[in-house]
Amino acid sequence: MEIISGGQTGVDRAALDVAIERGMAWGGWCPKGGWAEDFPDPPGLLAKYPHLKETAHSHPLQRTEWNDALANKSTMTRTYLRNHLDPIADRVTLIDGEAEVLPGIRVEPVPGHTWGQQAVLFTDDEGTVCFPGDVLPTINHAGLAFSIGYDMLPYQNMLTKRALLTRAMNERWRIALDHEPGSAVVSVQADPKREGQFVLKPRES
């Protein structure tokens, strides 16, 4: 058994302490400089937990997703499989916060479905295309309170969705819905019947 944690909270840190005390294998990723709320200055957590690996940035969000994946945590127990993840672990570069991962392709945090979920965006001749992941899986989830039953942070998902849809409407994005069985590429409009709500309209291209 191996304990995977970033050591950011009391429970996560306690898991590392138990592993060390009992001689168990342990590891995980922490923000750059070993950042934590109670260890804001380098080397931070790394002074106590030197086996942790640093991400490129000090924001903790997306690093959380990788740690959760390795630990088989949250709702993704049938999606994040160690026999899929371990072979690529040495090729993974963890990015926290907004970043350009390849020329023209960027990622942004969209927490809610999981703690560390991110959206992928790129720009073409028509504007921005956004893959929002499970913050907005189908056209039927356009309602701000319409969440998946196994979202880890339903209220945060609602806040994330509101911010994302507002921006998508104002900037005329195309949204690509990863679980939509019909027309998966949509545009965002204000709902004429419900103030502060949105509707998704299929795009022909």
Image: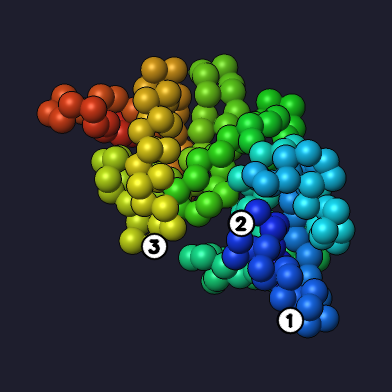
Location of residue 12 (image quadrant): bottom right
Q: Which residue is drawn at 53% across and 52% down?
A: 115
Report the mark closest to the observer, 1 or 2.
2
Q: Distance between the residues labelled 2 and 3?
A: 23 Å
Question: What label does residue 98 carry, if any?
Answer: none
Question: What label does residue 9 carry, if any?
Answer: 2
Q: Is residue 69 above or below residue 2?
A: above
Location of residue 51 (image quadrant): bottom right
Which is nearer the eye, 77 or 64? 64
Q: Of the residues shown, which amino acid type is indicated by label 3?
A: Tyr
Q: In this view, does 157 lie above or below 172?
A: below
* Res. 183 in view: no
Q: Where does the N terminus fall, quadrant-wise?
A: bottom right
Residue that carries the numbered disc 1 in the rendered image: 1
Q: What element carries label 2?
A: loop
Q: Is mark 3 on a helix, strand or loop?
A: loop
Q: In this view, does 63 lie above or below 195?
A: below
Q: Residue at x 74, y 27 (%)?
A: 103
Work out whether mark 2 precedes mark 3 in sequence or the reverse, and give the earlier one.
2
* Res. 155 in view: yes
Residue that carries the numbered disc 3 in the rendered image: 150
Work out whether mark 3 precedes mark 1 in sequence or the reverse, and give the earlier one.
1
Q: Which residue is drawn at 73% across and 45% down?
A: 39
Q: Is residue 64 above or below residue 139?
A: below
